[in-house]
Amino acid sequence: MLRTKIAGIGIYLPEKVVTNHDLSKVMDTSDEWIQERTGIKERRFGKKHHESTSTMGAAAAKSAIENAGIEPSDIDFVIFATLSPDYFFPGCGVLLQRQLKLKEIGALDVRNQCSGFLYGLSIADQFVRTGMYKNVLLVGAEFHSAGLDFTTNGRNVSVIFGDGAGAMVLQPSTDQDSMILSTHLHSNGAQAESLSYINPGCHGGVHQGVERFGYPDQEFGGAFLTEKMFKDGDYYPFMDGQAVFKTAVVKFPEVIMEALTANGYQVSDLNMLIPHQANLRISQFIQKKLGLRDDQVYNNIMRYGNTTAASIPIALYEAVQENKVKKSDLVCLAAFGSGFTWASALLKW
């Protein structure tokens, strides 16, 4: 039976390193405060006006294509996952197609935030397994630093996120020891506003999440930015950290076990778990709950912060480079984020 394999993987990380001490110079925070709550020591920031989400994604894609031993002209479909696109529209997929000078192939944008890469992986898997495409380019990239509030008001969010990109080339496989076994996708919008970036938007103040902010009348269905939004600084991301943490530590283990059970495996069979790098404390909680050893979980949030849609491919790439993931290893990828959405993928590397 035709299955999907990861034929190539690549990453891109901006040169600029921003430490917790650097952030403490512009907001009321400290290295100790950030590390205690998140485990993060430093992160990378892209160069404004010179780099963007799509250029970082393109750099990671070039690396993945080279790693797969193919040419850009061989790519027959693009999937681009991000929450920080270059433009409100069009999406980054077509910008990547232009930058890499790809053929006039399809380009799909995925907006599932932290879970976006795994949603994209699931889509790519279906396309490859049905024989529709032979070389799917999947990219996850983020330029968070361009849209964060670097004041004390925004510190609960801004200290967490970093910039970067990761990419994979997915191809058909008949090798039973190197393939994607299954993917599992979930969502629940009951707490959608608990982790959100509501403005700019065209909501018109018509749903309960917007009512919380008390916007003035928007008679014609929603101005993208209003004077009140600027005054209140209400055009930055919002996060209810406790709500996110409480749900994440439940859904992460559930979706990991779902993947293992669906394929007849137990936790003890797992060679490596690579969680989306949301928060080191969340990863440690999951590890303890599942009874995993230190060598069964890979974390790099300490160096890069949370790069949302890019975090899983960056972490997987590094784990492979460090020989912590080897040929035929059983690997589980898992993510939880805004929406709420959560997902997992089980594969043999």
Image (cartoon, helix red, strand yellow):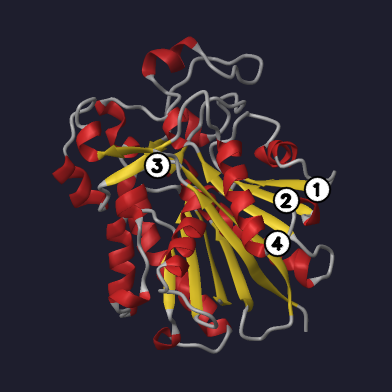
Residue 270 as seen in the image, left or right of residue 170: left
* Amino acid type, label 2: Val
Question: Which is nearer the N-term, disc 3 or disc 4?
Answer: 4
Q: CA distance from mark 2 to mark 4?
A: 9 Å
Is residue 162 visible in this depiction of the protein?
A: yes
Question: Which is nearer the N-term, disc 3 or disc 1?
Answer: 1
Q: Which element type, helix, strand or loop, lies under badge 4?
A: helix
| Mark 2 touches mark 4? (CB < 8 Å) | no
How far across and how far down the image is residue 135, in percent? 75, 61
Q: Which residue carries the number 1 mark?
A: 106
Q: Closer to the camera: disc 2 or disc 4?
A: 2
Q: Which element type, helix, strand or loop, lies under badge 3?
A: loop
Q: Which residue carries the number 2 mark?
A: 78
Residue at image position (28%, 74%) is 288
The image shows a total of numbered marks equal to 4
| Mark 2 touches mark 1? (CB < 8 Å) | yes
Q: Which element type, helix, strand or loop, lies under badge 1?
A: strand
Residue at image position (65%, 57%) is 66
Name which quarter of the figure residue 323 lies in.
Answer: bottom left
* Amino acid type, label 1: Gly
Q: CA distance from mark 1 to mark 4?
A: 12 Å
Residue 329 vs 141, above or below: the answer is: below
Q: CA distance from mark 2 to mark 1?
A: 6 Å
Is residue 239 visible in this depiction of the protein?
A: no
How far across and how far down the image is residue 277, in percent? 40, 56
| Mark 2 touches mark 3? (CB < 8 Å) | no
Q: Which residue carries the number 4 mark?
A: 124
How far across and how far down the image is residue 190, in percent? 50, 50
Residue at image position (29%, 53%) is 302
Q: Which residue carries the number 3 mark?
A: 162
Q: CA distance from mark 3 to mark 1?
A: 29 Å
* Amino acid type, label 4: Ala
